[in-house]
Image: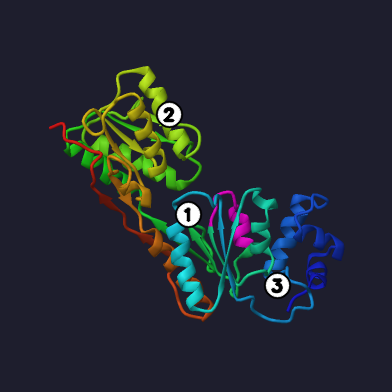
Amino acid sequence: MATIKDIARLAGVSISTVSYALNNDTKVSKKTRERILATARELNYQKNGIASDLKRSSTRTIALIVTDLSGPYYSELVKGIQEVTLSKGYDLLACSSVGGETSTAVKFLTEKRVDGAIVLAHNISEEIILQSARAKFPVILLDRKVESEYVVSIEVDNEAGSHMAAEYLIKQGHRDIAYISGMAISELHFMRIRGYERALQEHGLNSKNRLHQFGLFNRENGYSMTKMLIAQGKLSSAFMYANDEMAIGGLMAFKEHSIKVPQDVSVTGFDDIELAKYVRPALTTVLQPKYERGALAAHLIFQILEGQDTEPYYILPTQLVMRDSVSSKA
């Protein structure tokens, strides 16, 4: 097994410089750090974050790294991952990536603290992902793609799902459809917008001035943005929200202003979180397979650890769930 001495010798630097570079210390220039990390990858070096006298080769733990652990979306995803990991006799460790490259989550990736990782965090850079993935340390990446023989990407067909919702509204006679979103921070959000815009273009409809984006993808922002649009007057006949949480916030705003859903405006969401079927009116939304994606991610980690072949990329379908928040204008 390669050591930092081996890296220092091959990279032509001191052992202390290697140590600084592996710990992201600013004492080392970016150019030198990149050369040292490239040498470490060449030697298949893996830093061990467990105590140095711990001689076991496996931690029997899988890490789930997410940007935010508080959202309702995550419960089904975690359930799918956890059921597979427990069936294999492994533990699941969930941690937040808040802090980016200085977070504890990055240490679980760059040091050998777990046996594999599932990453749903867009503030973890591609560089960190590539640096971390190894033959004995698989990384499953959700909602984005990174080209590496040790990384498997799983995406949901977000563009098709959003297109499906917009197409449904158009078939119900809606021609003025607003799209309410937070600030797009990942390809996932851009794909949902593309699906909406493509459906409108296919029917000769204009999305100009109907795309509203700022703030977070949560209930409070959906509520605030909807209140703002109500105050401006001349509401669209239908509102597509980037996710269910924003849509539920929108329903609250409409109710406060005595705007009836779906009689006055129609509303759709995305994700099909559990609460979507319990709000009133029950929310028409796009289902993405949360439990199934979690179970697949965990299953793939164990396939890789057991030396089985896997595909580098998987895309899961979406499905429109029609409930009570949309009415026909035809």
Please name the amino acid that badge 3 sits on. Answer: Leu
Q: Residues within 10 Å of mark 2 (few under 14, many from 20)?
A: many
The quadrant of the image that shows the N terminus is bottom right
Marks 3 and 1, the one that precedes in the sequence: 3
Which element carries disc 3, helix, strand or loop?
loop
Which element carries disc 1, helix, strand or loop?
loop
Q: Is residue 328 left or right of residue 255?
A: left
Please name the amino acid that badge 2 sits on. Answer: Met
Looking at the rendering, which quadrant does residue 204 occupy? Answer: top left
Please name the amino acid that badge 1 sits on. Answer: Arg
Asked if the stretch drawn in magenta spans residue 263, the answer is no
> In this figure, which residue is indicated by the disc labeled 1?
144
Q: Residues within 10 Å of mark 3 (few under 14, many from 20)?
A: some
Q: Which residues are magenta?
A: 120-131
Please name whichever residue, 141 or 169, is drawn nearer the observer in this view of the structure: 169
Q: Is residue 67 left or right of residue 312?
A: right
Which element carries disc 2, helix, strand or loop?
helix
The quadrant of the image that shows the C terminus is top left
> In this figure, which residue is indicated by the disc labeled 3?
43
> In this figure, which residue is indicated by the disc labeled 2?
225
Real-space Cα distance between discs 1 and 2? 28 Å
From this view, report whether residue 54 is shown above or below residue 7: below
Q: Residue at x 82, y 67 (%)?
A: 8
